Image (cartoon, helix red, strand yellow):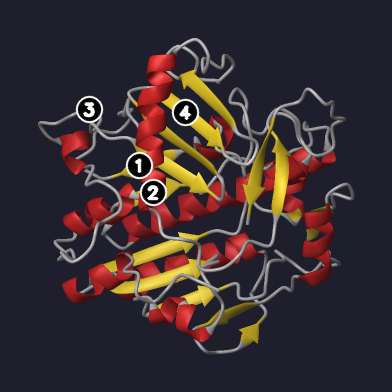
Amino acid sequence: MGLPPSEIILPEILKPAGYHNVHIGKWHLGGADKFQPKNQGFDESLWLETGGLFLPEDDPNVVNAKLDFDPIDKFLWGNLSYAVQHNDSGRFKPDGHMTDYFTNEAVKVIEKNKNQPFFLYLAYWAVHTPLQALKSDYDALSYIDDHTERVQAAMVKSVDRGVGKIRQALKDNGIDDNTIIIFTCDNGAPNYVGLPNGNKPYRGWKLTLFEGGIHVPFIVNYPDSIPAGQVYDGRVSNMDIFSTAANLAGATLPTDRKLDGTNMLPYLTGAKLGSPERPLFTKNGTFSQVIQDDWKLLWDQQQKKKWLFDLKNDPTEQNNLIDQNTTKNKELSNLLTAFLAEQADPLWEGAVNSPVHIDKHINESKTKDDEFAYWQN
């Protein structure tokens, strides 16, 4: 099970334009040989394979936070290894805490490829369970009382340090003025860590389509084109990276298929400053959502429930207007129905179909009146 090789992703577009493509870190698009990064346009891949531990559990330099209330966490501790793989090298142990190791390898990529166009997809495993921090980072955060929160914060610290080292490497190698950095995330904080404020003030968690699950940081460093400190007052999808980066690189886009995302450069730096007029969709199993003109509709088909929010006046999704605004409900429902009708059927059945509480984490007591949405994986 994995991303079909017939799908075209960014490195496959950049390669004919002369780019050397490198992947480091998380993949999760299939482990069989035909699904691996090397067969999707990457020249090099340093990937987790069946790894996932940041350090061996008993390493003297690690502080662990086990979540005994979470079955996912128990599975990870019992099954993940401390290992990576480079292309077809076979599994081997990294050198140090996984986050710092990935950073150091990314710096080597920069140094080695500074004289040619390159694309580096650095997918840090942090911050992710199992929660494991360097003892030095943990000790530096003694003002945080909760042990789990302190370990997680220490893991954030290691990512911050890594981004700083990468930016410095670009400067040291004289290519910081000609390199675009995009810093983003795939989802909000999960409910299964058991910390109540991971996505505040937004509602919801990873595995839901409420803002807490999908409203993530998106920071772009593009010297001389995007002014430092400029805040874009619109909505960007991670899928926009494909079209935007391909256009920036002068790559040739395929004409035989519908492309994901929008080239955002004119909306960030040109005459079209603002937000493109388009709906944004997300679908997970039987749970889907659409955002258009600051209105958001969520539809959980399994429990036959909809939520409608005015994000401009209610960005934290407190007031469900599904019964009060029937016109907007109908308009967005038609958009979402048309979008769902265009989607291909799943290539395989999901292994999980579970309710996720929207306002409570996994270790909080629940009542029959709590709202939830179904997550499929």
Q: Which residue is mark 2?
A: 341
Nearer the viewer's eye, disc 4 or disc 3?
A: 4
In three-dimensional space, the C-alpha distance between marks 3 and 1, rounded to whole angstroms, equals 26 Å
Res 274 label: 3
Q: Amino acid at mark 3?
A: Gly
In three-dimensional space, the C-alpha distance between marks 2 and 4, rounded to whole angstroms, equals 17 Å
Between disc 3 and disc 1, whose residue precedes? 3
Between disc 4 and disc 3, whose residue precedes? 3
Q: Position of residue 205 (x, y in %)?
A: 64, 37
One can see residue 56 in this view = yes
- Mark 2: give few (<14), some (14-19) or many (20+) Cα within 10 Å: few
Residues tagged 3 and 1 counted as in contact (Cβ below 8 A): no
Q: Position of residue 95 (x, y in %)?
A: 64, 74
Between disc 2 and disc 4, whose residue precedes? 4
Q: Secondary structure at mark 1?
A: helix
Q: Amino acid at mark 1?
A: Ala
Q: Which residue is mark 1?
A: 338
Q: Secondary structure at mark 2?
A: helix
In three-dimensional space, the C-alpha distance between marks 2 and 3, rounded to whole angstroms, equals 29 Å
Q: Position of residue 376 (x, y in %)?
A: 63, 52
Q: Position of 325 compared to 141: left or right?
A: left
Which residue is more in the foreground, 43 or 277?
A: 277
Q: Which residue is mark 4?
A: 297
Residues tagged 2 and 4 counted as in contact (Cβ below 8 A): no
Residues tagged 1 and 2 counted as in contact (Cβ below 8 A): yes
One can see residue 140 in this view = no
| Most distant residue in the left direction | 271
Q: Amino acid at mark 2?
A: Ala
- Mark 4: give few (<14), some (14-19) or many (20+) Cα within 10 Å: many
